[in-house]
Amino acid sequence: AGRGRIAPDDQIPHPRVLMLNRSGKWVPAVEPVHFDKPYAGVGPGRTFGILVAERDPSITVGLIPAACGGSPIAVWKPGAYWQQTKSHPYDDAIVRAQKGMQDGTLKAILWHQGEADCGAMKSLVYCKNLQDLFFRFRKDLGMPSVPILVGQLSHFPGETWSEGKRRVDTAQKKIVKEMPPSAFVTSDHLTSNPDRIHFNAESQREFGRRFFEAYRKLINSFPDK
């Protein structure tokens, strides 16, 4: 969802980048794109959308925010409820995606999650849960070949990963290889907010650029610049 500090430029609309707001209406994509928690901030999605739009002047990009901050993968199943955001993460994401697909074509799913699954027990079942989730996304949206882009967990300077975090990272890389078309987006050298938990705004924008580069290479339809 993004927790980066919002700057004035983040609220200047791009004429061909929209977002689906909380009530399901298309509006100009300005930060915060997400609305999961009151302190939602800069995430990677808007930068990604702008770069896609700028590579193809003939299109309008619609972002469909559906992240639920802090959510473990266990609540990304039909019917599951996440108390922190008072929402049903999976069900809501599907409904919102289907709403957006009434006006266009679903081109990619950006997935950045896993911190809540780095515990000793949860990390053991993360690989199977992620595989099931991606299969379910594609099946329920009727898009068996929609690209899925997986953002890597944070590894900030000086941070030492737990065994569980390494296990989640390994699982994400494995599923990306086994479920094409997919791509893994590294978080190397990205930095944090003072909380040492969330990426700062500059890193979120850089993450958006990396998501775009991964997408461009995956679909092989945008020229190099």
Image (cartoon, rainbow, N blue to C red):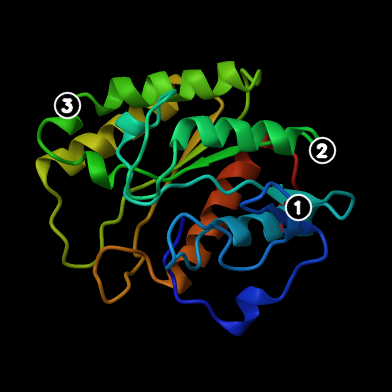
> Which of pointers 3 and 1 lies earlier in the amino acid sequence?
1
Q: Secondary structure at mark 2?
A: loop
Instruction: Identify residue type, mark 1.
Output: Trp
Q: Is residue 37 left or right of residue 84?
A: right
> Which of pointers 2 and 3 lies earlier in the amino acid sequence?
2
Instruction: Identify residue type, mark 2.
Output: Asp
Cβ–Cβ under 8 Å for marks 2 and 3: no
| Numbered disc in front, either 3 or 1 | 1
Q: Position of residue 207 (x, y in %)?
A: 48, 58
Residue closest to the eye, 151 or 139: 139
Q: Which residue is mark 1?
A: 26
Residue closest to the eye, 187 or 93: 93
| Numbered disc in front, either 2 or 3 | 2
| Quadrant hosting residue 113 | top left
Cβ–Cβ under 8 Å for marks 3 and 1: no
Query: Which residue is at 32% across, 44% downward?
Result: 83
Residue closest to the eye, 38 or 130: 38
| Quadrant hosting residue 77 | top left
Q: How many marks?
A: 3
Q: Residues within 10 Å of mark 2 (few under 14, many from 20)?
A: few
Q: In this view of the protein, can residue 106 be seen by the observer?
A: no
Q: Position of residue 115 (x, y in %)?
A: 26, 47
Q: Which residue is mark 2?
A: 103
Cβ–Cβ under 8 Å for marks 2 and 1: yes
Q: Residues within 10 Å of mark 1 (few under 14, many from 20)?
A: some
Q: Which quadrant: the C terminus?
A: bottom right
Q: Position of residue 167 (x, y in %)?
A: 20, 35
Q: Which residue is mark 3?
A: 124
Query: Which residue is at 53% across, 24% downward?
Result: 137
